[in-house]
Amino acid sequence: MSMPPQRPYIVSDLNAMQAMAALFDQLPDVVFAVKDLDSRYLALSEGCVGRCALRNKWQAEGKTAHELFPSAMANRYRSQDLQVFSERRPVRNRLDLTVYHDRAPGWCLTNKQSLHDPDGRLLGLVCISKDLTELTREKLLDERFAACVDHIQTHFDRPCTWRSCAICPASASARWTAA
């Protein structure tokens, strides 16, 4: 099944994106972020402050995920960014390991969409991640489950076989370990 072409989201200036981020400041279980083509944060919501051990959200501006998150998570986030940039397709409802406000690992659903200027030039992306605190607390999601979901999302266009289902947790689980 192919996705329809992505409608470009147009950004006129960074102030508009920072105002948008402020709308999410009262939602501690949501992180809103805008990144440039090098995956540097340009605007963030307050949801990133505790999870990244920052004094305020402005400290993250200009930094990459590799400067704020454990290496395995940062590598995954950067890979998703590059996918959005190269394929010009959004990332939708991707199950991700993240860091919660108390610095404990937890699960979230991530959505990423490319951003373009009025002339259609790619500028970066916008990301919204929603924590799955209840599922994490109840231990309903684990590394094996996340690895299987990741495998299915990556290979959704291929036939599913018992062999591929049996090997997906073993081959992918190392990517989900928090560093």
Image (cartoon, grey):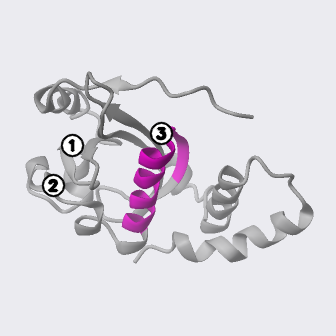
Q: Amino acid at mark 3?
A: Arg
Q: Amino acid at mark 2?
A: Ala
Is 51 on the left or on the right of 146, as rendered? left
Residue located beneath label 1 in the image: 44
* Image coords of residue 19 (percent x, y): 15, 27
Query: Residue placed at 51% from the left, 38% from the top?
Result: 89
Is 130 on the left or on the right of 152, as rendered? left
- Label 2 crowd bin: few (<14), some (14–19), many (20+), radius 10 Å: many
The residues tagged by marks 1 and 3 sit, at their Cα atoms, a distance apart of 22 Å
The C terminus is located in which quarter? bottom left
Q: Quadrant of residue 55?
A: bottom left
Judge whether residue 131 can be spotted in this image: no
Q: Which residues are magenta?
A: 73-95
Query: Residue placed at 64% from the left, 31% from the top?
Result: 3
Query: Residue placed at 55% from the left, 51% from the top?
Result: 95
Query: Residue placed at 18% from the left, 63% from the top?
Result: 53
Residue 88, labelled with which disc? 3
The N terminus is located in which quarter? top right
The residues tagged by marks 2 and 3 sit, at their Cα atoms, a distance apart of 26 Å
Earlier sequence position, callout 2 versus callout 3: 2
